Amino acid sequence: MSIVTILWVAVAVAVVLASAIGYVLLRRRRQGLRRRRQGLRRRFGPEYERTLNEQDSRGEAEQELRAREKHFATLDITPLAPASRQAYAQQWAKLQERFVDAPGPAVTEADELVITVMAERGYPTEDFEQQLADLSVVHGRTLHHYRQAHEISRRVAPGETSTEDLRQAMVHYRVLFEELLDDGDEHHPQPAEAREKEPALTDLRSA
């Protein structure tokens, strides 16, 4: 076999090997992207699709969600102490009682109470859009409740809401409120007797 032939064989082998390596690397990259995409879908739930619809491309949407994760990692989010959890649950029960006679003020106070709980947990509360971004990392599956409640609450002062609107707002607020109270229990479990003493969060769906 001539030297030229050997060189051509070597080049051909090198090309085949390079193609094979390139294929493997590309496949691994695609698998990595697929895993990261699935992870974002699981973590953000409906927020994934919402962000996708708001951005020009899937890449930009996923970049936005990863940026939220990075920002969230810088926050010192902590579960509530049992005493705080019980006190807030009592405040919510009183708000629901107040709703019967003063639904508008009760909804406004519910919005304020949710923000107060967020602040104690360690969430920034100065900007509503930032609130949504930070909450979406952990509460993405129920965040639409907070959006709807906030939108109704915004219309309370101008008198643009019906009693049914206000009732819906309380129901929506309660979803996030309960999550904020309970989040972290799996790491800080309470004794069963302590949970039994906590006031129940009354259901407003039939109020």
Image: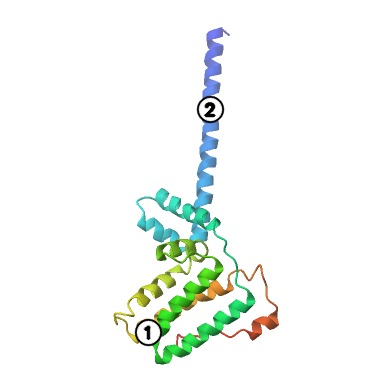
Q: CA distance from mark 2 to mark 1?
A: 69 Å
The residue pinned by badge 1 equals: 104
Look at the image and name its color scheme: rainbow
Q: For the N terminus, which image quadrant?
A: top right
Residue 150 in sight from this viewpoint: yes
| Secondary structure found at label 2 | helix
Left or right: where 85 falls relative to 47: right
Instruction: Using the rendered view, name the quadrant where residue 83 is placed.
Output: bottom right
Q: Nearer the viewer, residue 166 or 35?
A: 166
Residue 199: give x, y in percent of width and height: 59, 85
Residue 182: give x, y in percent of width and height: 58, 73
The residue at the point 52 percent across, 53 percent down is 70
| Secondary structure found at label 1 | helix
The residue pinned by badge 2 equals: 18
Residue 139: give x, y in percent of width and height: 50, 66
Q: For the C terminus, which image quadrant?
A: bottom left
Residue density around tag 1, few if under 14, some if 14–19, many if 20 or more, within 10 Å: many
Mark 2 vs mark 1: give the one in front.
Answer: 1
The residue at the point 42 percent across, 69 percent down is 144
In the picture shown, does residue 187 fall above or below 95?
above
| Earlier residue among tags 2 and 1 | 2
Q: Nearer the viewer, residue 43 or 181?
A: 181
In the picture shown, does residue 150 fall above or below 17?
below
Residue type, mark 1 in image: Gly
In the picture shown, does residue 20 fall above or below 46?
above
Q: Nearer the viewer, residue 5 or 189?
A: 189
Instruction: Using the rendered view, name the quadrant where residue 120 is placed.
Output: bottom right
